[in-house]
């Protein structure tokens, strides 16, 4: 089985998010970058599915400039066999999906995995765009994934429940928690990652359709109103008369 | 020009989010001096669809076909895109629901449309671009996204937009688009619904608990509190990681993002990753025995106290309140 895993390079979850240039750009000063946590689940699943190389190969792909290479190397350390970096700063999901689709078209993958969304721009757009660009099925928020022969069985979340569906390969799956336990690279993986192939591909010309033009940070709540432990009636009263939520 | 809005149903009944997106789409149509057309897929009675006219929808396309009884992502996306073309829609609106997230990118790709996911406000229309606000960085920021393509697809964040009644009269029309057989590439095998439970992303009140509850055996009072309030239950990540609660209840940066009217956090410290998923809640109540817990800094109301003492008292007080009102 040939698996492609799409990897996004995102600010660490503990990052304080601030902006520069008149609040038009994310301020990356002092920010540590990590593999998007959902992509880590996708990658861990892919590594499990190929059984340490016995049953196939795992290729990771990232659309990014040279600064994303440490994240790509970490993906190789977790267990991917090879990596592709499309040498471009991602402009929007449309741009990224087209770059990945272009690579996937000439490389017959059986399975394409992405995270359900990236934790920076949270668009959750790439998996289904890829499915559409490649004319194959896509499932955007998968909680479980099993492959048997040529068939994928996928459990996806729906409001107030879950749905189980099947699709023939190839298929695009956006993975959420539950699909796999995230793997932590070991020393052997880290050493091995240095010599694994990382190919750099130049982007195709695609115009972005959207852009992030301005940011605000959400209003900070005015000071918390503390209520005595022994006075829960007061809380009920405030929720009714002041907050008007009950 | 028109605005096309996709209306979701659960077993023939319109979802709560359906009225949100209908109201949102008709307000956009009003701004653009055009009409808002809804599209529904699957078996939904005309009397149910007619309800949309209370929210400014003047036409409903209904697509019923035996092959479409369950959700087929590709086929549904093709139908909605065909509906947009038929109606000459330059704006397509969906809910940012689990299904909406699977459909919108495919529709946007078909229409070469710029897509904004999880919008929280009505767009601003400029001469050559459209601006829409949404959250970014897992709710740590609000971003303004500019769309430059002629056609735009927008998914609306659940609970972010106040539904407004605006009565018009709606005509219901059967729509029979051609769907390629290759669009039927997935087969739904099973649907499991927790019928007695309120869906977390759509809930107006959420009662959430963390590691402070000590173990799964103590969730009885959390469920009872949720019951009294008509709320959905949620939890912090370590709680679902430990298997105390199902993953589907985990909120935060790597879980579900919620924006209810009221979020009650019990025995949750308020780590930055947790706050990312709940900070757009309208009112936050924190119950924690540690006065230094970071959650208090983002709360509207707080009780410093032991959950095992406070929660039962709160349940009793709410029962009295509900009994009197
Ligand atoms: C990559 C990454 C992603 C993450 N994503 C998420 C996420 O999406 N969602 C999430 O929730 N976490 C996430 N986390 C974990 C997060 O950092 C915290 O560890 C987690 O939120 C803490 O959960 P908690 O508040 O339940 O537990 P703790 O931090 O252990 O807090 C328990 C709280 O309970 C209080 N308490 C104890 N006993 C009582 C009592 N009897 N009565 C009242 N209060 C009591 C304590 O004072 C304490 O504040 C993530 C972490 C990482 C590294």
Image: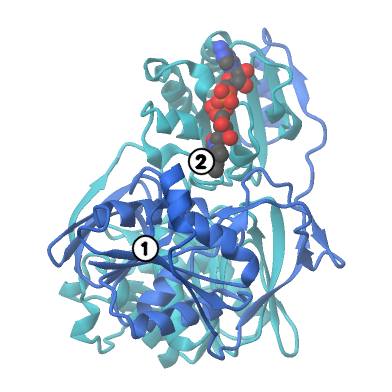
Whether A227 is drawn above or below A101: the answer is: above
Task: Confirm or reject: label 2 Cβ below 8 Å from ligand 1.
Answer: yes
Q: Pointer 1 indicates a residue of which chain?
A: A
Q: Which residue is mark 1?
A: A81
Q: Farthest right residue?
A: A22
Up the image or down, B132 lies above or below A145; here it is below
Nearer to me, A220 or A132: A132
Judging from the image, what is the letter of the chain drawn in blue? A
Give how far across and how far down residue B218 sits, in percent.
Answer: 42, 15
Query: Pointer 2: what residue?
Result: B251
Q: Measure how far apart labels 1 and 2 are at the Cα level.
A: 33 Å
Q: Which mark is residue B112?
A: none
**Residue nearest the viewer, comparing A102 with A78:** A78
Residue found at x 58% / y 47%: B259
Q: Chain of mark 2?
A: B
Residue at the image position 51 percent from the left and 59 percent from the top: A73
């Amino acid at each position: 089985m040939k698996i492609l895993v799409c990897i996004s390079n995102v600010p660490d979850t503990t990052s304080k998010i601030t902006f520069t240039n008149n609040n038009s750009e994310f301020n990356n000063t002092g920010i540590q970058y990590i593999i998007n946590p959902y992509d880590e689940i996708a990658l861990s699943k892919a590594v499990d599915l190929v059984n340490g190389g016995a049953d196939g190969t795992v290729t990771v792909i990232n659309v990014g400039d040279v600064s994303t290479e440490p994240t790509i190397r970490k993906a190789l350390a977790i267990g991917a066999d090879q990596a592709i970096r499309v040498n471009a700063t991602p402009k929007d999901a449309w741009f990224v999906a087209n770059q990945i689709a272009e690579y996937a078209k000439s490389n017959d993958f059986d399975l394409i995995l992405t995270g359900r969304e990236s934790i920076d721009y949270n668009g959750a757009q790439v998996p289904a765009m890829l499915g559409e660009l490649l004319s194959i099925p896509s499932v955007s928020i998968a909680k479980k994934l099993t492959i048997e022969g040529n068939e994928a069985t996928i459990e996806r979340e729906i409001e107030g429940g879950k749905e189980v569906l099947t699709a023939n390969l190839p298929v695009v799956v956006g993975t959420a928690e539950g699909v796999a336990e995230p793997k932590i690279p070991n020393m052997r993986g880290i050493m091995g990652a240095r010599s694994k192939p990382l190919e750099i591909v130049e982007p195709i010309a695609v115009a972005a359709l959207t852009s992030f033009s301005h940011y605000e940070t959400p209003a900070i709540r005015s000071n918390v109103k503390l209520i005595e432990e022994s006075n829960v009636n007061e809380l009920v009263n405030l929720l009714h008369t002041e907050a008007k939520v009950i | 020009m028109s605005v096309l809005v996709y209306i979701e149903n659960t077993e023939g009944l319109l979802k709560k989010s359906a009225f949100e997106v209908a109201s949102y789409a008709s307000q956009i149509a009003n701004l653009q001096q055009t009409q808002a057309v809804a599209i529904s897929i699957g078996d939904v009675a005309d009397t149910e669809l007619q309800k949309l006219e209370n929210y400014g929808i003047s036409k409903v396309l209904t697509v019923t076909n035996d092959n479409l009884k369950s959700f087929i992502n590709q086929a549904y996306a093709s139908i909605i895109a065909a509906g947009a073309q038929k109606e000459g829609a330059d704006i397509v609106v969906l809910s940012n629901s689990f299904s909406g997230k699977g459909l919108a990118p495919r529709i946007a790709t078909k229409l070469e449309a710029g897509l904004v996911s999880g919008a929280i406000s009505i767009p601003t229309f400029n001469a050559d671009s459209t601006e829409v606000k949404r959250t970014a960085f897992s709710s740590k920021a609000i971003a303004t996204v500019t769309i430059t393509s002629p056609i735009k697809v927008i998914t609306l964040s659940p609970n972010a937009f106040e539904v407004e009644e605006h009565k018009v009269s709606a005509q219901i029309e059967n729509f029979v688009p051609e769907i390629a057989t290759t669009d039927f590439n997935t087969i739904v095998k099973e649907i499991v619904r927790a019928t007695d439970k309120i869906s977390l992303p759509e809930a107006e009140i959420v009662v959430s608990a963390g590691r402070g509850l000590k173990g799964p055996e103590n969730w009885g009072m959390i469920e009872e509190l949720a019951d009294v309030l008509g709320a959905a239950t949620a939890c912090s990540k370590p709680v679902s990681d430990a298997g105390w609660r199902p993953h589907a209840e985990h909120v935060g940066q790597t879980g579900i993002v919620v924006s209810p009217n009221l979020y009650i956090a019990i025995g949750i410290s308020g780590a930055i990753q947790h706050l990312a998923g709940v900070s757009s809640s309208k009112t936050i109540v924190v119950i924690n025995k540690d006065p230094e817990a970071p959650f208090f800094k983002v709360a509207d109301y707080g009780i410093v106290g032991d959950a095992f003492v406070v929660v039962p008292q709160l349940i009793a007080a709410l029962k009295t309140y509900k009994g009197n009102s």
